[in-house]
Image (tube, rainbow, N blue to C red):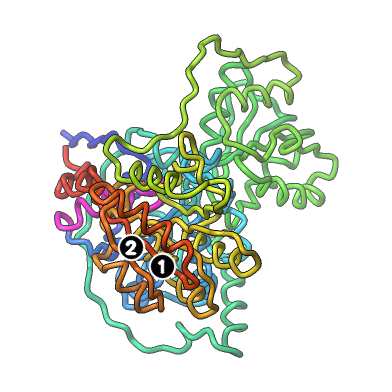
Amino acid sequence: MAQSKKILPLLGNEAVVLGALESGVGFVSTYSGTPASEIGNTFYRIKDIYNVRFEFSTNEIVALEAGIGAAYSGVKTLVAFKHFGLNVSMDAFIPLSYTWPRAGMVIVFADDPNCYSSAQSEQDSRIYKDLLHLPMLEPGTPQQAKDFTKLAFEISEKFEKPVVIRMVGRVSLQTGPVIKGKIKRPKTTGKFIKSRERFNTMPPDVLEQKRKLLKLKQPIRKYLQTKNINPIIYPRGYSKKSGIITSGIGFQYTKEAQVTLNSRLPVLRIDSIYPLPVEKINQFIKDKSKVLIIEEGEGVIEKEIKVLSKEINPKLRIFGKDLIEPVGELNPDKVTLVLSKFLGKKYSIKESSLKLTRRTPRFCPGCPYWSIFGAIKQAVNPEKVVFCGNIGCYMMGYFPPFEMTDTLLCMGDSISVAHGIKKVSKQKVIAFIGDSTFLHAGIPGVINACYNKSNPLIIVFDNNVVAMTGHQPRPTVKVENILSAAGVKNIEVLDPVTENEKLKQTIKQFLNKSEISAIVCRHPCLYANSLERKVGQSPFKL
């Protein structure tokens, strides 16, 4: 009797981990960022069980560069981060695409439509495909997340190029049934063998490397045609003149919308964002009079299909972002409403009669940041001080009762923005930054402010952990030592809870200094060991 398949309930992020383990991944690096955090968290918990070399890197470009070194040395590698981390990695990522790793290399990033966890901007990172020219797959379910991770390693090994997987929050954090396969024993030791042809990106070789990269597009497209992806789904009694093209999570919503409206349109689900399945698209659109394109974010697929249709079917009417605004995430109601307009049917979204009390984010009970913001508000007149915010739990200082964040852009920006304000004004400026964010991207700003002689006050929120994204560990270096080495002469280290009065006095004193000053507020996060408690637990064992 055949052994039954093991089916596990996994998050999309956990399914990526399982796919990597089944592919024999040997090295994994990441910088935590929601909605991708569970990829690193899971590897951290199980690294010793499955003998995988894993690290939380100091930032995303470092994570990618470490992964590049491992893949160049012949060890299968996975690198993971959120969409803003993808931006941080780009200085290394684009040149990487010109080179030829000696082992499978997969880079996973997670976009955050609707800005649930990343408030600074809503970004559709699929647009990077035309800069990277690397295969990009987009799963829509946890099972696809596992399957596409395995496929990505397969493609990477065959063509000796990195492969990208694009997740979104709804896929990363949804739970679904995933079939568990055989986990491979990883190879974790390699050797770097010198080869200028593989790894050199200096002119004039770099131009030839780009030519070789671009020539891979068609062979990769043909290879993907042999795989069970980019399907066309024909319902019973389907319409021959109309159809839907969709991708990722949009396909799941499309299925619900079709049932709700009793629609029988054929659907092309696009799984490979780069290269697009041109043959499938041409086959799908050649005899249609109109097509609805449902994709979350920008009209990335829509723009390319409009170009293709001019040659294949010039009379085809294409609907997409004229019906779906490129803002916010999709959901079943939105997609059903759009499909009803496309079909000419009546449908309205029912407004909920449930009235919920509006609440703003708060610090956890017992969080030391209550004491820090309380001290600042008592020490200065908030109307006369500019507060430059940063990424971390202290972002909650933007909301009542404190309302003390005037700027907020990206990891590490607060010190440099504060420096710029001080260089052109006489205002008093305080830059907020957490210990992990400081190590991630804040150090260059400190060096710059010292070198170019401005005098903002830096307040470091030091709880010795990466708290906001799940309590991951951070390097155990002392922030004050780095501040001193960078040139900061006025430094005070204190406990904001037990030395709150001293904190108030130091703020008043340092704000009037003619040189850059820093206060390191050190008090542990009460929940900092929550990830540590889970070490050794594997979600892949029944």
Q: Secondary structure at mark 1?
A: helix
Quarter that holds the N terminus: top left
Q: Secondary structure at mark 2?
A: strand
- For label 2, the residue is 29
Asked if disc 1 and disc 2 are in contact, CB closer than 8 Å, the reply is yes
Main secondary structure along the magenta-highlighted residues: helix
Amino acid at dot 1:
Leu
On screen, 391 above or below 530?
A: below
- Which range is magenta? 32-50
Whether 41 is among the magenta residues is: yes
Quarter that holds the C terminus: top left
Q: Residues within 10 Å of mark 1 (few under 14, many from 20)?
A: many
Amino acid at dot 2:
Ser
Mark closer to the chain start, 1 or 2: 2
In the current view of this chain or complex, which residue is farthest to the right?
315
Q: Nearer the viewer, residue 12 or 349?
A: 349
Disc on res. 318: none
User: Residue 257: horizontal and vertical position, in percent?
Assistant: 59, 23
User: Residue 454: horizontal and vertical position, in percent?
Assistant: 54, 72
User: Viewed as shown, does residue 352 lie left or right of 148?
Assistant: right
Q: Nearer the viewer, residue 74 or 222?
A: 74
User: Viewed as shown, does residue 341 lie left or right of 507?
Assistant: right
